[in-house]
Amino acid sequence: MESLFNLHTHCHYCDGIDEPEAYIKAALEAGFHTLGFSSHAPVPFKNNFAIQDRDFLQAYAHEIRELKKKYRHRINIFLGLELDYISGISGDFEKYRQEFSLDYTIGSVHLVRNHQHHDLWFIDGPKLESFDNGLSEIFGGDIRKAVTAYYAQVDEMLIREKPDILGHFDKVKMHNRNRYFREDERWYRSRVIETLEVIRHTGVIVEINTRGIYKKRSQDLYPGQWVLEEMLKMKIPITLSADAHHPSEINGYYPETMEILKKVGFRSLMCLTPQGWSEKVIL
């Protein structure tokens, strides 16, 4: 199948579970033609999810390049990074591209900045209380202000950094679980559509991320079906990813997602090839 690829993969260099070669072997067993590694790039504060320093980042890049050569006749391997964007804090994406000769970048927002507060709102991770406490302490419990700040940060990243792929762009909904807002509220839909317009203008590829469903942290894809319908109208290019942190996850919820995409009306996915980005038919 042309759809058997994944460009969002985390190995043990960041918060993934296993060594890179274990993911390649799993991909080959699953019949993949392409696998991209996208470890979390370093961020300038203590954490437990990202590559910790540039020396470790150099080692990561070297190992992926060596594996690319080792498996070049069996599967396409690509070197990427998932780069966090935090307004006024994160590094220049282009510097990473140039210094480490990256094949592609994924731009994501996991930590939301309120410019009137010194802490960051962490919207990811397994702990619901991190989301709730951050919303209360950093945004005074004002969900509309917090969500608006999240999407504004995504917009700023798209315009300033132009990643190849936008990662799980409506992930702010993950720990919400319809407790603070509903996705059918007019203000929320309007704000998402505003970001879709920015995506269309910049030409960034949007990943359809399955991790929330197979990890049972979300009842929907990132982005959700109503957003997919809007994206189809806008002719926004998409790719499919599992956001895998374990070799067994590289095709998590893929068959079901393919059916959802077809029902919505999508007929192709963007995939990275040795010659560049290519549109792959999914029907």
Image: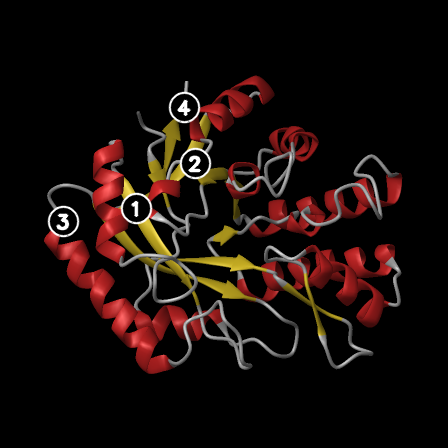
| Amino acid type, mark 4 | Ile
Q: Depth check: give the residue in front, 282 or 23.
A: 23
| Amino acid type, mark 1 | Leu
Residue indicated by mark 1: 35
Residue indicated by mark 3: 71
Task: Point out the frontmost of discs 2 and 1.
Answer: 2
The mark that comes first in sequence, 3 or 2, is: 3
183, above or below 225, in the image: below
Residue indicated by mark 2: 252
Q: Looking at the image, do the residues carrying marks 3 and 4 touch, with CB atoms under 8 Å apart?
A: no
The mark that comes first in sequence, 3 or 4, is: 3
- Alpha-carbon neighbours of circle 3 within 10 Å: few (<14), some, or many (≥20)? some
At a point 54% along the width and 80% down the height, the residue shown is 46
81, above or below 42, in the image: above
97, above or below 53, in the image: above
Q: Please give the label number shown on residue 282.
A: 4
